[in-house]
Image: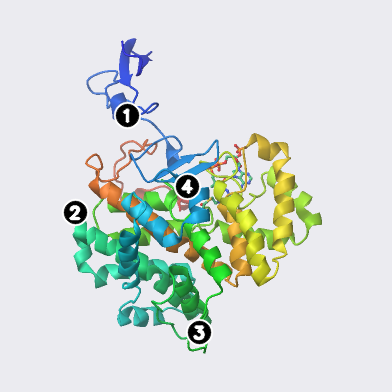
Amino acid sequence: MANNTLTITDNRTGKKYDVPIEEGGVIRAMDLRQIKTGADDFGLMTYDPSFGNTASCRSRVTYIDGDKGILRYRGYPIEELAEKSNYLETAYLIVKGELPDQAHYDRWKHNITIHTMVHENIKMFMEGFRYDSHPMGMLLSTVGALSTFYPDASAIHDLESRRLQTRRLIGKIPTLAAFAFRHTRGLPYVYPDNDLSYTGNLLAMLFKMTELTYKPNPVLERALDVLFILHADHEQNCSTNAMRAVGSSQPDPYACASAAISALYGPLHGGANEAAIRMLMEIGSVSAIPALIKKVKEGERRLMGFGHRVYKNYDPRAKILKHFAEQVFEVTGRNPLIDIAVELERIALQDDYFISHKLYPNVDFYSGIIYQAMGFPMTMFPVLFAIPRTSGWMAQWAEMVRDPEQKIARPRQVYIGESTRHYTPIQSRPKPTQHEDAVSEAI
Ligand code: ACO
């Protein structure tokens, strides 16, 4: 018998099964289907709510070793990319699989830059949003609306179409994000300036006032670029899973990206840095930290910006940002929340609860402090996450479209509801109070 198999004994029947172990530690869930008690038995399946131990795809994009705190895009360590690369080059790496040579980089930059404009109807569409709309709600709607502007995007099996939509979306998402921000401020939308860098142009579209030409501060431009590199992909997280799951029914990528942005919106994912800042503001001073830690340990609340499904060690992105924050503060002035954050981290990392639960700061713990120092309102934090993650979503989506093993994403369920019941006329149904008891938990 080969060593790379798993032998399973079904104690219900006494039968033994050999299941292959692939890729150094993976069994195929479908191999369990043969394990049955009889011809009418459906066969064994696994129960894994929230995919805690289930791989949904084979991917070449991003590698994470959560126990060691390692993150690599296409094999390149995140620390090297954050130090030496820029976001557009990293996006090329993520989307295409290799770092570009100069000619390919120049063409890529040109191809993204010429797609920064959006149709004027998009602008009018955005004007319909209420003045206090959350920019993330506006972003997910307008990205979804791009589907109506580019019907050619439905040709998802066409390589050139996939490439074009990728360039379009990476090019346009800063413009949509900036328009959403300006909308909340009641400010006129600023059109892209293609002479600026990717992040320089974003800063201009966000913050330009009456000056003829906006000159981004180079430190802040670079800081945003590094933040974008760190956020560009993160393998099968909630929003990427949404991108792939929706994409598996084969709509165009704008519809998929809109779903991914929706997934990113939540406070447990892209909304966590806003939640982390709110928590730090609520703590207010270093002396109030122990009281918060006590509440967290008693299960009353979570420490936002801490913990991760995959990292059971320090999130390498948080490590980079913690040091980077100081550079930003030299330009913006110190965000006083950093002192509370650093002390909170110090206390938490010495505490048995956090040690035993392997809870460390994640990328959201420090990113919000930097964004806030740069003048972004909290509602823009998840938007600033969505912009760079677009390259990751598009790369993961294209990988899914091209993967012959992928079919429509359709999980199984363990049905725990009623067995067959027969319809009764409305007059003969249970008394109102019994009915109330029965439905009190519903929705
Ligand atoms: N504070 C306190 N306790 C926590 C925290 C936290 N932030 N995160 C997890 N725990 C505890 C849970 O209470 C649970 O304890 P128990 O086993 O004693 O019941 C245990 O750690 C495991 O928690 P789960 O919720 O099962 O872990 P999961 O992997 O599902 O959750 C998540 C990961 C959602 C990120 C979680 O750690 C969390 O809610 N963190 C705060 C929100 C946050 O920062 N999200 C950003 C994630 S990074 C990103 O999206 C870019």
Label 2 Cα neighbours within 10 Å, binned few <14 / some 14-19 / many ≥20: few
Q: Report how far apart the C-alphas of labels 2 and 1 lie in the structure.
A: 27 Å
| Mark 4, secondary structure of its residue | helix
Q: Position of residue 88 (x, y in %)?
A: 40, 62
Amino acid type assigned to the residue bearing label 1 in the image = Arg
Comparing labels 3 and 2, the label whose residue is closer to the camera:
2
Q: Position of residue 418 (x, y in %)?
A: 37, 38
Query: What label does residue 28 carry, if any?
Result: 1
In front: 339, or 352? 339
Q: Report how far apart the C-alphas of labels 4 and 3 lie in the structure.
A: 52 Å
Amino acid type assigned to the residue bearing label 3 in the image = Gly
Q: Position of residue 311 (x, y in %)?
A: 54, 41
**Between disc 3 and disc 2, whose residue precedes?**
2
Q: Are marks 4 and 1 in contact (CB under 8 Å)?
A: no
Comparing labels 4 and 1, the label whose residue is closer to the camera:
1
| Quadrant of res 256 | bottom left
Query: What label does residue 15 carry, if any?
Result: none
